[in-house]
Amino acid sequence: MLDDGDNSESKAFINLEATNMNKEIVNEEVCSEFCGFDNVLQGADIEPANSFVMLLLLGLRYFTLLFTCMEALQIFPTFKDYNKAKTDLLSLIESVKINRDLPMIAGFVRLAFHDCIGKFKCDGCIDHTHRGNAGLKIITDRLNVLYETSHKGKISRADFYALAAVVALTRSTFDAPVKYLGLKDFKVGRGDCETSPNQVQSVDPPKGTDGTRKTFKFFKDEFNFSVNEAVTILGAHTLGRCKLENSGFVGSWVDEQFSTVTQGPFTLAPTSVLDNAYYREIIDVVPWNQVTINGTQKQWQEPDSPIPNDRLPESNRTSLLLNSDLANSWIIEPIDKSGSVLCSPTSQKLQCKHSAAHQQAVRFARDNALWVKEFTKVFNRMIEMNKYVLQKAPTKSCDDVVTLNAYEWDLSMFYDDGGL
């Protein structure tokens, strides 16, 4: 949710033209105090003995107001800077490849989600000391180097993080039958936190061991998402995988079984493709059985794979679901911190009951285009949460020239239709 008082704050801002041709908004009410310093110095009757003290106090006040105004800057990138950011982010995604997988796709999307958690929402700041953010530092390290060397002052870090996720999602559907087109509605102008890129996180990210009630309560409290919207955003788990050292779980949510992309040497792995395979796993694979990972946490695996994934080589691992994933179809309520659940979807003794989310998960499992469309709307709504009012990203003018190179695929359609 946006902080209260956005309307009153926006009235207090004036537009100034920056030398780098970016638009900046500065708090007029605060910064106008600069104008009063000359009047004070010229009109005041100051004793010589006190003049130094007065000048010192005025100087301190001046710098305090200066830093206050600097913190209030809202950056709107030019088309040239915005386009370069997209191109550089795509290059970064392509630079890290493991077989058919582009792990930065899932990494950028996860980063955007975690960046938007907390009081100030999507503010370009991550608390790397928080256990729930484990594994994100390798992502932010790569992004921050690129940002500091090429984009600082031209686009906010918060915009840069959000844009990285949207570029990643666009790339993830290059080979898929249903394209992600969220980039055409991307907005800019997010403000960074005062300590960017680091901060102390005020809200705990959701846990994979959480049950149905806590999972949907988190999305309601944090983003004001309905149950159906929470089901929609959880579909991002179709990307990436769990690592023991980060989350305590092991495996990926999806495999080739339900991928909408034909397996081939030049197509992306299912873990880098945005599609509804995640919902197919939940709805079409029944039953799921709980296993214990590393002797501490429970995860769900397919019934023909009773050996926990952490005891198997990666090539033999099954897909997994967490309690928070099964909540999309079943009422899952753990009885301990490890996530143990007494019921199971097909138990003869104690069968889990369907949750309120079940029908929405079924709809998404049966209609990939529907889910991609709904996901685009909900994801954009989430990443637009910020203390500032955002505006639509700049578009190409007649004088702008876009150079397409370095890639084998045709990117031309993405410039006018919302892609890269």
Image: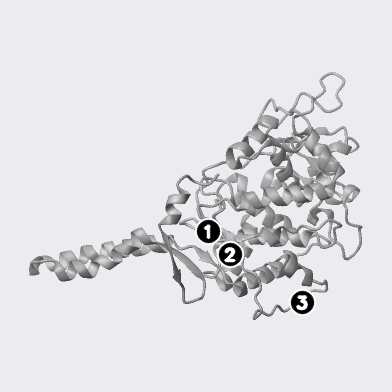
The way the protein has been coloured in the rendering is: one colour
Compare residues 338 and 279 and report the one nearer the observer: 279
Between residue 285 and residue 123, name the one nearer to us.
123
Q: Which mark is residue 318?
A: none
Residue found at x 54% / y 58%: 190
Label drawn at residue 406: 3
Residue 59: percent from the left, percent from the top? Answer: 25, 66
Q: CA distance from mark 1 to mark 3?
A: 30 Å
Nearest to N terminus: mark 1 or mark 2: 2
**137, 358: nearer the viewer:** 358
The residue depicted at 54 percent of the width and 51 percent of the height is 127
Residue at the spot x=74%, y=30% of the render?
356
For this view, does 107 lie left or right of residue 42?
right
Instruction: Tell me the residue that label 1 is attached to.
Output: 197
Q: Is residue 38 visible?
A: yes
x and y, in percent, of residue 344 in the image: 81, 27
Q: Is residue 299 positioned above or below 135 on the image?
A: above
Quadrant containing the N terminus is: top right
**Residue named by callout 2:** 144
Determine contact: label 1, label 2, CB under 8 Å: yes
Residue at image location 79% in from the left, 46% down from the top = 251
Q: Secondary structure at mark 1?
A: loop
